[in-house]
Amino acid sequence: MEYAISVLLSGISVGGQYALIAIGYTMVYGILRLINFAHGDVFMVSGLIAIYLTTMGLPLPVTLALAVLITVLLGFLIERVAYKPLRSAPRMSVMISAIGVSYLLQNTATFVTGGQPMNYPTIPALSKMVTIGGASTTLVTVVTPVLVIALVFGLVQLINHTKIGMAMRAVAKDFETSQLMGIKINRVISTTFIIGSALAALGSILYFTNYPYITPTAGAMPGLKAFVAAVFGGIGSIPGAVIGAFLIGICENIIKALPFEGATTFVDAFTFALLIIVLVFKPTGLFGEKATEKV
Amino acid sequence: MLKIDELKVSYGGIEAVKGITFEVPERKIVTLIGANGAGKSTTLRTIAGLVKPAHGCIHLQGEDITSLSPDRIVSKGLTLVPEGRRVFPDLTVLENLKIGAYLRTDSLEDDLNWVYDLFPRLKERSWQAAGTLSGGEQQMLAVGRALMSRPKIIMMDEPSLGLAPIVVKGIFDIIQEINRQGVTVLLIEQNANMALKIADVGYVLETGRISLTGSGRELLANEAVKKAYLGS
């Protein structure tokens, strides 16, 4: 019983962390119809930024806040430099640009760290041990789902009830008509990247707290899982991405806990197989738009 | 009020508009008529700032607006009701109207009431998603949305497209009403008959060039126009 609870708890926790990355994928897709392949690497770089800032000896909360801020700036710059100039280019070109940025970030990380695994700072507030239903776990397991739900609630309010949110929904549907309304679409797109990067940075703090170190490819797998979660939930839909991420996190941990030899080794393949099965029956994902193509 | 000089626009190497010059006087209804592909839509899209011209200039109340971005042009009091209405289907009717006033920071109350007076149907449906409206209602919404920016001049691209004749008549009545209330109108239409009937000035556009000019009445009586555009 304790074992089942602990499996479920780590599933919810890692699912919440995937959710924070998945929102960035799904929002950018919603507006630009672009799979931002660099997003997982932004998540990794955010972790490295936190590590390097820690060495400067600032108080931990300041360090983490700065790390989020710099990640936001990075996400903003990536869009301005790598995607904006290709605004009227075919979608495939922008995607290739995203792959390019992804490798640029990984290679830069390798260059800066010398390819060595870097130790992530210990955040006492998150790594404190707690006991839930007899299963002991770190506090981050509890903090993650609560924080994710609060952030998603705030984000949905922003999108449905503010002027910028209305502009985001308009731009997602129709660039040209949005421009005719006087909306500066570049500003709206930048806002989307800023929100996505901020959430990825928060996800990065929660995720890497559970891992002893970061390598330059540490963003690839969580990034891919989050992307899968976004597709699973119906790409373009924020609640879909969040629910998809929680489901994937939980499934992954259940598969890992199965009493088969190699369950741990094959966990990623099984998770993806599960996704394929869902997509066969529901091609647009759980909450996907009916018409996926942009008019 | 709006002056177009020697405007040339190219699309992917093809010159769609080949140097046209025309003028929209204040408080008048001006129409550009012409067949499909004559360059009517391109002209309006260029004036609105969505397309950059290859040559020529556009002046609004004496000010050069040729290279301005669409949002700057809207803020100067020029708005376009796009072809095919293009309402935001997932936004409610009210949100569509509010987004038309995106650049404004003052109170929208009076203008909402003004639009609701012009189109009482929109008031009834204010909380409905715009995608659930009929074609005619969507056209009303597209016009209402454009009016929310408080334009001095409103450009309309084929407002009668795909609508039943009775609905078209309603839309044209509204165009005249808006004009009476002081808004200058630049209208492009394939329904040349309707357009010329309400227009003070008409221009005939043929393969990127203006071939004829006159008052609406003159053009309605013109033999060449009758033959080519009025089907008689």
Image (cartoon, rainbow, N blue to C red):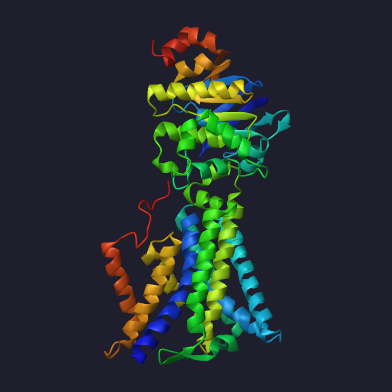
In the depicted view, which residue is nearer to us: B108 or A138? B108
Q: Residue furthest right?
A: B62
Q: Position of residue B89 (x, y in %)?
A: 44, 44
In the depicted view, which residue is nearer to us: A278 or B176? B176
Using residue B159 as the reference point, say whether residue A73 is left or right of it. Answer: right
In the depicted view, which residue is nearer to us: B22 or A19? A19
Q: Position of residue B188 (x, y in %)?
A: 51, 25
The N terminus of chain A - image quarter: bottom left
Q: Residue at x 44, y 11 (%)?
A: B226
The C terminus of chain A - image quarter: top left
In which image quadrant can residue A63 be found? bottom right
Q: Position of residue A201 (x, y in %)?
A: 57, 74
Using residue A134 as the reference point, say whether residue B63 is left or right of it. Answer: right
Q: Residue at x 43, y 66 (%)?
A: A241
- Looking at the picture, does residue A87 appear above or below residue B50? below
Q: Position of residue B32 (x, y in %)?
A: 53, 22
